Amino acid sequence: MSASLQEDEAAALLATEAAALDGYFSETPLNPTPTYPILDTTFSTSIIITNLPRVNSTKLDKLVKVITKLVSRIGSLASTDDFSGVYLPIDPELDSTFGFAIVEYNTVEEARQAVEVLEGYKFDKNHSLNVIPYQRAQELENVDSTAEYEEPQPEPFRERPNVSAWLEDPIQRDQFVIREGKETIVKWSDGKTEPVVDYDGSREKEAGVAWCEYYTHWSPNGSYLATLVPSKGVILWGGQNFEKIARFPAPGVEFVVFSPQENYVLTCNNRRDDPNSIKVFSIQSGKLLRAFPLYPKDFLPEGMTPEQIPPPAFQWSHDDSYLARMGRDLISIYETPTMKLLDKRSLITDGIHEFQFSPKANILAYWAPEHGNAPAHVDLIELPTRTKLRQKNLFNVTKCSMVWQNDGEYLGVKVTRHTKSKKTLYNNLELFRLNEPGVPVEMLEIKDAVMAFAWEPSGHRFAMIHAENPTSTKVDVSFYDMMKKVEADTKKKSKGNKTTLSKTVGKQEATEIAEINKIETLSGKQCNCLFWSPAGHNIILASLGESASGTLEFYDVTNKSLTVKEHYRANNVLWDPSGRTVATVVSQPMGGGHF
């Protein structure tokens, strides 16, 4: 077939196809104008990490994977089909990396947080990272190296307010804060006369701003008053005139938690969709140390939703050295001020249900239920060595509740057990003596249901509410002492490993040995809560709640005297730190205040 004939047939075929498609094409002439996204030349979402190991091309992929894993913990990387979000340039002559990496995040906030978190991070035993924003590198590039150096001038010294000024009150009053309506007022109280207003935000009212729009919170030692302004964050006030000391940006904040030594403050907005829902700030520097999501990774069991399980709370150690949170079968413990994992790994605690720090030592107590053939157990772990000080195995356990004595001398664990049929529940108390060699544990069997348990502050006594039926309106309140007094004519003797404390009375010597003994039981009481005075000796047996009587029985455990008061529908009792004054409250949380 000739070439001309083939061309004719092809032309005829095209003509037939064109006729079939007639009407499908627009007569409008094509004028394609491509639209491209706006080029971001600020590089505000990028950072530069220096002081990385220098490796050749054969180890490049491995190093990139390690860096990617590290930086992606902080935020999501701006990755594409051909870019992972991490770039390590290579010197072609030496076939080696330059020792730095460029990392790009999706948001400016993630990049800023990465600079704060990764600065000084110990990448390995020979390399500690230095991190700067990419924009800072651009600024340094434009620095005139020939210009004469000018020493920067320090900012003028500004004396900070004396946050302990309230302790210098000449008539030794205490302060309390009350939020009513839209007013937040700090008052003086001496426990004898009407409270006197100390500060009510008048300075801020004159300036047309609110010094508080939500809840308030005192720091543990009373040095700072935190007021919450959800649109801005948390503001700290202190000193004789309640001056503004610091402000921490935390939009949507709902509550704060101070560290015991007042070095740090934790904020939370309770938003499940916010990867930075929880933030930890240094009070002195004002810097954000680290941010966390509301729930740890893989915390929720399969099939469970956040509405069904509350987020696990962060807890501080007594000396501010550690901040810890429970995860799934583990406890993540972060060191301050770096906020990095202790020893770069979490503490494995299979099946953990609850943990608490000792109030006076770096000791963790946690309990886990029965799992497979393993019994339920309570463990005491010393930090930072992770040494297991004691493990107490428990059987037929339904639930445990742990309560530390405020000096850390004792740990009480209320154990709710079940019979083999699981139809009947009963209680017992496991009492740990932390100051004894080997941490001995005493078991106190309780036939009744135990509704409340409380240690006497800085003492050896504890109290508990119990009744045969947990729904009973009439209950018993029993008092116990962890030390037993023994009088003898001879000098003190030690019995086994038990501690003895001696006191001479006349010609006899009164000795206290480490042995639990019952002091007394008060029967037929109407109470559901216990509140020891911070000074000890006195305790309030309170009947709180809407359906309760509001009876408040003030009992002196030492002198056996009783005084009865009443506050109908009271739902909270608050002692002042000195134990001189107590407030009973009827309140209902209503989005930023109390009614």
Image (cartoon, grey):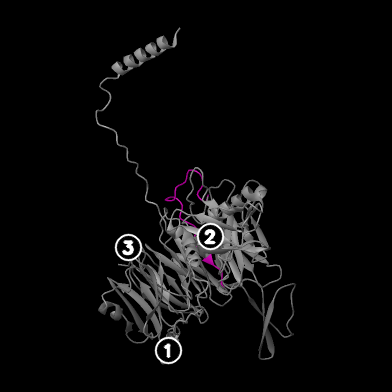
Q: Is residue 267 above or below residue 457?
A: above
Q: 369 and 75: which one is in front? A: 75
Q: Secondary structure at mark 1?
A: loop
Q: Is residue 259 above or below residue 23?
A: below
Residue 280 in view: yes
Identify the amino acid type marked 1.
Answer: Gln
Q: 352 and 48: which one is in front? A: 48
Q: Seen in the image, is 141 located left or right of residue 348?
A: left
Quadrant containing the N terminus is top left
> Is the stretch drawn in magenta largely helix, strand or loop?
loop
Residue at numbered disc 2:
48
Q: How would you rate the neighbour count of disc 3 (Cα within 10 Å): few for under 14, some for 14-19, many for 20 or more? A: few
Residue at numbered disc 1:
172
Residue 116 position within the rendered picture, expressed as x and y whole percent measured from the top left: 51, 65
Residue 451 in view: no
Q: Nearer the viewer, mark 2 or mark 3?
A: 2
Q: Seen in the image, is 489 located left or right of residue 202?
A: right
| Sequence-first disc among 2 and 3 | 2
Q: Which mark is residue 591?
A: 3
Q: Residue at x 31, y 63 (%)?
A: 590
Where does the magenta region start and end?
298-318
